[in-house]
Image: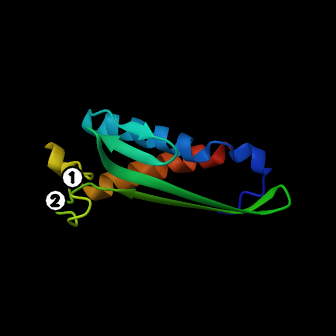
Amino acid sequence: MYPECNIKKLDNITIKIANAICKIIKNLCNIDLEIKEPNDLILDGKKIGGILTEINTMGEIVDTLFIGIGFNVKQTIFSENITNKATSLYLNNIKNIEIEDVICAICNELETIIEKF
């Protein structure tokens, strides 16, 4: 994105995105996620997703904003070093949700959040 706004307007953008994802998952799956600041999404003590944001500026003006979101929807196998630390919706008995539904809901909400800036 190219928001061309003052950097101060994007304070806490990662937390705002995390809160939005928590709301989306609550609406879609009726489960509550926790946020482990600054960017992890937690379900029952295990990481289910994460958010990375990168902002490039020219002075105090934001030139570009990059948002990366990883969220485990149907993953059933994790590498040995994270198997006890990671989870997915599928592993928490949310088997009827489609990946596309989660992606669309997150993208729609992100568009709303970004428009506010």
Which residue, given by chain and number where applicable, does mark 2 sit on? 76
Depicted 22 relative to depicted 105: above or below: above
Q: Residue at x 72, y 57 (%)?
A: 3
Measured from the top left, where is residue 57 in percent x and y? 77, 62
Q: In this figure, what is the number of numbered marks?
A: 2
Q: Amino acid at mark 2?
A: Thr
Tag nearer the camera, 2 or 1:
1
Q: Residue at x 80, y 50 (%)?
A: 6
In contact (CB < 8 Å): disc 2 and disc 1: no
Which residue, given by chain and number where applicable, does mark 1 sit on? 84
Determine whether, in the image, residue 83 is placed left or right of residue 104. left
Residue lying furthest bottom: 79
Can I make out residue 13 in this image?
yes
Residue lying furthest right: 59
Q: Nearer the viewer, residue 29 or 33?
A: 33
Q: Amino acid at mark 1?
A: Asn
Mark 2 or mark 1, which has the lower sequence index? Answer: 2
Helix, strand or loop for disc 2: loop
Q: Nearer the viewer, residue 78 or 108?
A: 78
Q: CA distance from mark 2 to mark 1?
A: 12 Å
Depicted 27 relative to depicted 46: above or below: above
Can I make out residue 94 in this image?
no
Image-quadrant location for residue 12 = top right
Q: Which mark is residue 114?
A: none
The quadrant of the rendering that contains the C terminus is top right
Helix, strand or loop for disc 1: loop
Crowding at label 2, few (<14), some or many (≥20) Cα neighbours within 10 Å? few
